[in-house]
Amino acid sequence: DSGVTQTPKHLITATGQRVTLRCSPRSGDLSVYWYQQSLDQGLQFLIQYYNGEERAKGNILERFSAQQFPDLHSELNLSSLELGDSALYFCASSVTVNTEAFFGQGTRLTVV
Amino acid sequence: GNSVTQMEGPVTLSEEAFLTINCTYTATGYPSLFWYVQYPGEGLQLLLKATKADDKGSNKGFEATYRKETTSFHLEKGSVQVSDSAVYFCALSDPGMDSSYKLIFGSGTRLLVRP
């Protein structure tokens, strides 16, 4: 158990809908990363937050957004969902921006 | 830009066979290199890492050496077990201009070890 908790584990929703994925980092970790794992794109970095502030952005679609709250948990919001958004979404956390990141078990999103 | 290329799988071996999974990288700076493992239905676990040239990372019988001259970080294990069956990802972290230690992953190599 990495100490990073993601909920829900599985999510099935219809095209056009909006979902929120939640991540609780390890106790004491200030940095949160979101990654998407899909069959065609592999594992891709989406976005990073550090202590509530956006730190870096990767290949994140405009339909997607994220935030990190004062208690350091993070949410990834996916809207106007398309079939191609079906993927495993991972959250990872680290103590600071340049230390080893620990991954959660992921949320499997299926868009039908 | 930065990228990681690893050998395509699946790699199928018999128990106690020698394992090599090739990984090469392209980076503009001086990256740290990692191998992550993903067991079925689970998240990613860090297997080993190396932060500078000629460093050797090792864990659970797996080893990889950071070779700057060949931009490689090949994963090796002398004798694989059935329990090593998983998907292995090579990754790099190069802070670059945004000082973010985000990971850039290779495409993953599935390893299947037969009894």
Image (spheres, coloured by chain):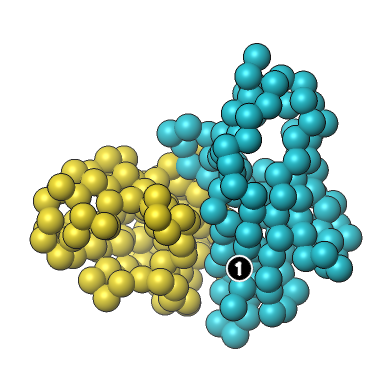
Chain colours: A yellow, B cyan
Q: Chain of mark 1?
A: B
Disc tally is 1
Q: Is residue B75 above or below residue B85?
A: below
What is the quadrant of residue B110 in the picture?
top right
Residue at image location 72% in from the left, 78% down from the top: B29
Under circle 1, the secondary element is: strand
Nearest to the observer: residue A27 or residue A11? A11
Q: Position of residue B30 (x, y in %)?
A: 75, 74
Q: Amino acid at mark 1?
A: Ser
Residue ID for mark 1: B3
Q: Position of residue A11 (x, y in %)?
A: 23, 44
Q: Residue furthest right?
A: B54
The answer to whether any part of residue B49 appears in the image is no
Q: Which of the pair B23/A94 is nearer the observer?
A: B23
Position of residue B78 in the picture relative to residue B45 (left or right): right
Q: Residue furthest top?
A: B115
A10 left or right of B3?
left
Q: Residue at x 75, y 35 (%)?
A: B19
Q: Residue at coordinates 64% horizontally, 49% vertically from top-left?
A: B7
The x and y percentages for residue A53 are 42, 76
In the displayed structure, B87 sits above or below A38; it is above
Circle 1 packing at 10 Å, graded few (<14), some (14-19), many (20+), is: some
x, y (%) of residue B78?
A: 82, 31
Q: Does residue A41 appear in this view?
A: yes
Give the residue drawn at x 43%, y 34%. Answer: B41
